[in-house]
Image: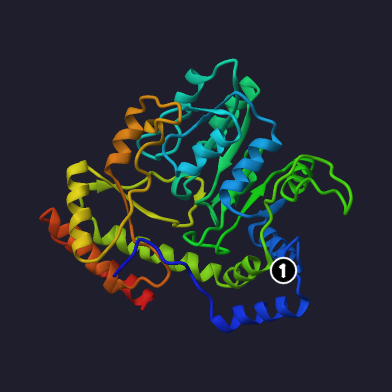
Amino acid sequence: MIPVTKPFLPKIQEFEEYISSIWERQWLTNNGPLVNELELKLKTYLNVKHLLYVANGTMALQLAIKALELSGEIITTPFSFVATTNSILWEGCTPVFADIDAETFNIDPAKIESVITPKTSAILATHVYGNPCDIEAIQSIANKYGLKVIYDAAHCFGTKYKNKSVFEYGDISTTSFHATKLFHTIEGGAVFTQCPELLRKMALMRNFGHNGPDEFADVGINGKSCEFHAAMGLCNLKQIDEILDKRRLLSFYYWQKLGNLQASYPKLNADLDYNYAYFPVLFHSEELMLKCLKALENEKVYCRRYFYPALSTLPFANPASMPVCESVARRMLCLPLYHTLTCSDLDLITRVLLRTQNYDEPAETEASVYSIHKLLA
């Protein structure tokens, strides 16, 4: 069986060393030493100014909305995981959808301005598949109308935009360290901001508002993560460059083998250092996508329709017609991509796809495919 993803797991002996240290200290949670170590090492690796490690990526979004004191309407994308919209609703705000760009699959800045009203307080945009939004255009609109900007950067670990981490943009950026992500802490997430005051506010909020043993400075919740999750993160961070490089090679192998597929791929931002978080394929028709999905499942290859259905169609989420997103969502399929995939696995997947639409592997790519095959061996 080939699933759409598998979590990267370090050598168990390395993880056990961290677990043994937790047993010795008997400090399991509440801002323990491994949590602090992970935060510092993540800041160094990502070269970011401020970072808070939190329980999960959804909690990160909720903290961002609460810390910015948002109310009323938040303009957002209909093409994302449901947590993006759910966080807006959970915090008592109304999601207002703006359609997506047909090539990048990110929110289309040209569609944002037309849905701004006196009730609009912010823009919450997702960097879909780790590909940055049109950050300058979004910030220009936010400045013009006095709006806050939150980026759901759940897919973006390791992504750089204009030579710095994409987490450094917006009033607050959030990410996920869920087990399905290329860097994970089993469960976990983080918030990033350039503003020290916002950082302090979110630090209080993630720990019940505690400002000392007997003081509470703000309304808060339990948004902390624990030492065991931090231990997994510390193990995985040591391997992250290898993980990123392997995913890059696998992605190029896919692209070269699928030269004849009736499909397209995201248009990547020109100022991007990409992390190859997913391998999304936009088929020319939903019929072909479903046919390929079925053929792959018959071979025990399991893909996912990230992201389907369009969030703008959910009955509880202020539904609206988003024709570009709805078309993309119906035709998009993410193929398996994870650290232990082999060339043989990709050969099977690509062969099934090409056979299903009656095309052979493109002969002109054989030499370059062979060179990547050697690098992956």
The type of colouring in the image is rainbow
* Disc 1: CA contacts within 10 A as few (<14), some (14-19) or many (>=20): some
How far across and down, in percent of the image, does residue 86 sit?
Answer: 51, 38
In the displayed structure, 87 sits above or below 159; it is above
Q: Amino acid at mark 1?
A: Leu
Q: Is residue 190 above or below residue 12?
A: above
Query: In which quarter of the view is residue 68 placed?
Result: top right
Residue drawn 65% across and 62% down? 45
In this rendering, would 40 be left or right of 315? right
Where is residue 361? Give x, y as percent: 17, 62
Q: Secondary structure at mark 1?
A: loop
Q: Quadrant of the C terminus?
A: bottom left
Q: Residue at x 54, y 47 (%)?
A: 153
Instruction: Tell me if residue 364 can be seen.
Output: no
Q: On the picture, is 180 further left or further right than 60?
A: left
Residue sitting nearer the eye, 221 or 298: 221
Residue projecting furthest to the front: 214
Relative to 163, is 106 on the left or the right?
left
For the residue pair 307 and 282, the one nearer the viewer reads as: 307
Q: Nearer the viewer, residue 159 or 182?
A: 182
Which residue is farthest top? 118
The residue at the point 34 percent across, 64 percent down is 3
User: In the picture shown, does residue 186 fall above or below 157?
Assistant: below
Look at 76% across and 65% down and name the residue there: 32
Frontmost residue, 260 versus 157 = 157
The image position of residue 152, as x and y in percent, is 55, 43
* Location of mark 1 (residue): 28
Q: Quadrant of the N terminus?
A: bottom left
